[in-house]
Amino acid sequence: MIVITLPDGSKKKYPKGINSLEIAGQISEGLARNVLAAKVNGKVIDATMPINEDADLQLLTWKDDEGKAAMWHSSAHLMAEAIELLYPGVKFGIGPDIENGFYYDIDFGDYEISDKDFPKIEKKILELAKEKQKFQRKEVSKKEAEEYFTKKGDEYKLELIKDLNDGEITFYQSGHFTDLCRGPHIPDTHFIKAVKLMKIAGAYWRGDESRKQLTRIYGITFPKQKELKEYLEKLEEAKKRDHRIIGKELELFAFSQNVGQGLPLWLPKGAELRERLEQFLKKVQKEAGYQPVITPHIGNVNLYKTSGHYQKYGEESFKPIKTPVEGEEFFLKPMNCPHHCEIFKVSPHSYKELPIRYAEFGTVYRYEQSGELHGLTRVRGFTQDDAHIFCTPDQIKDEFIGVIDIINRIFNAVNFSDVIIQISLRDPDKPEKYIGSDENWEKAEKAIKEVAEEKGLNAIVEYGEAAFYGPKMDFMVRDALGRKWQLGTIQVDYNLPERFDLTYIGADNEKHRPVMIHRAPFGSLERFVAVLIEHCGGNFPLWLTPTQVIILPISEKYQQYAEKVLTLLQNFNIRADIDGRSEKTGRKIRDAELKKIPYMLIVGEKEETNNEVSVRRHREGDLGTFSIEGFADIVNKEVNKLINQ
RNA sequence: GCCAGCAUAGCUCAGUUGGCCAGAGCAGCUGAUUUGUAAUCAGCCGGUCGGGGGUUCGAAUCCCUCUGCUGGCUCCA
């Protein structure tokens, strides 16, 4: 007998070799019907796998992420089976579960396939699912495994097997399909009741651009048709928050073929919004001891040779611009740091001056591959809220604290809460990959970890993710479609001070090397605005929104009173407008709601007589009447709450 | 850059297997209406159907090519 401990702490004895599904059956029939996989001593395994020793057992169902993963992984196999039946002779790469569903990379050979084939494949998948195919695990030797796929002629699987150790290879068979697979899988296919193939894409074998491109098919499955429907509706909702759509609707930015791909045009409303962000940060930075600098949009090729960027990125950049007479070469500036290093070098520095913080809203240009461009989040020209801090190794910690405070202020001002913070440190096994002394690295890494601790940041530490020139801390936010975008960043750099031979004179009257910290709270204004739009669905915080208040006179008779209200509000620094069209009030309200204007002021006879305004809040409705000053006070309080905390 | 798809009026979209001067709603303009919490009515304007080439008696529709966009892959100082 063995002792099984359930998550609630209860223990029970079972015969050796019992499986999780059988245990579930003894607890309740309903539970047994829902078990997709099991977690035994922390390891997820098939629910049908025998348990031979005392163990902690957690039964995994659709409610558990790991249950979903098993379901989707099994769905990938099922899709592969369906495809193999429909298109005999295709070869398979890998087919894992992912965050939302699964994919399979397939070499379709001479078959031409597109999303038009999806319904056919979906139908086949559901047909096979109904057969209640069991997922059968089989341990095979390396030789057997190789023989099977040699016979099948699947070179991709053979390549995968080559990297595996004999004795650790398992196959899973379901229906007509056998796959090299570690598992785990759901007990059988009947759980798969709804399927939707989402998209088709090319994917390089093993992510290697130089190798063959396979066809990747993404799909998702559910145990109930209703859940699929809900999922698709959720996606539709997310699409409405897409910054590209809202940006067009609210006339914030645009693109033009004539200007060029990935080169955004900021329309007046968007430009003003962006300026408000810039002004806000400038004010915060001034308080924090930053000094403004301004540098040109191009730089001599030698500047980038000194920085080392030319050697690394020269080939993948926009081609240099040449002066017509001398033939001197200039690059569009891909980053601001080399320029700022040159500013540091203009005069000698004493340790007493440090830290020196140069800030610039610097517009940079990078050649991004055409297929990568995406709205404002991935562009070829963008403006960084860049700054470079030159300090001593001992000052790194305080500087990190200062930057984190700035980032927090900004994120609070725009109500960002779902922020993911990643600390990227050295790979401890490969110290030779990194520039700079061990001592300095240790100091910086320790400082960053301490800061994260002290600031109570919920940070993930990743070893081996640091740049070769220094450790960093990145701030990431998810967009409407769940994609993660990096916004702010703080990076320590030991490399550029070296390459530019930056020095300061220490208390010992000797030359010393400063440390450089790159930091950008927004990251880029473009990406920040994009993520902000998706985060708030176009309903910007009051301090940022293009028009804060729209005055809606009931008829032309009250136009004059509306103008009086407008003037008063403008005196309170409120951005207001009048909708003086000869339309019905309902129509004006509707249009203002669609434009997402936070406050609507309805003014007619009553209001004019009492010197008041009727206030309607966007998405909320009628708030009642207020005096003009009283209303202005409400607006200013709401603005100050976010930006003066 | 690679794979797949898409491109019709300022915007959102219709246009059946190639066949009468290419349509609608919204926006815009003009006029009427003077309006109380999510769409007042009427008229008008607006399109070399993304560009170029080809097949055909005839192309928005079929083929080739270029450009751009969308979703992935690769990349990201």
Image (spheres, rainbow, N blue to C red):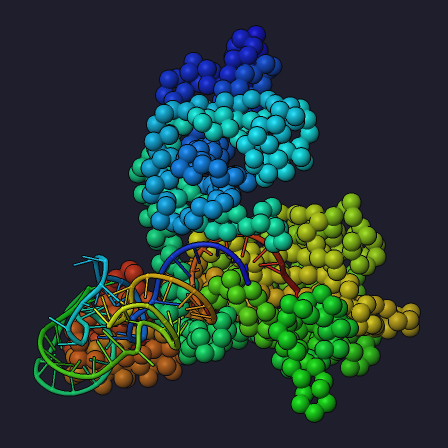
Q: In the drawing, does residue A92 fall left or right of residue A329?
A: left
Residues A300 and A178: in front is A178
| Residue situated in front as seen by the camera: A489 or A350 | A489
- The residue furthest bottom is A325
Of residue A526 and residue A300, the one placed in the foreground of this image is A300
Is A492 left, or right, of A636 in this rendering? Answer: right
| Front one among A188 and A508 | A188
Q: Position of residue A86 (x, y in %)?
A: 40, 37
At 53% from the left and 57% from the top, the residue drawn is: A485
| Residue at image point 56% right, 22% down | A138
Task: Estimate the x, y position of residue B27 in percent, counting from the top left.
Answer: 25, 75
- Quarter of the figure with residue A595: bottom left
**Residue A286 visible to an observer of this rendering:** no
Q: Which residue does the image show at 51% across and 28% down from the upper left?
A: A178
A342 lies above or below A518: below
The image position of residue A256, as x and y in percent, is 43, 75
The residue that appears at 46% across and 15% down in the rendered structure is: A22
Say above or below: A443 vs A4. below
**Where A155 falls versus A399 (above or below)?**
above
Q: Percent position (x, y) of residue A626?
A: 27, 70
- Residue A144 sits in quarter: top right
**Is residue A355 left or right of A284 when viewed as pictured?**
right
Q: Quadrant of residue B1?
A: bottom right
- Of the 4 image quadrants, the one containing the N terminus of chain A is top right
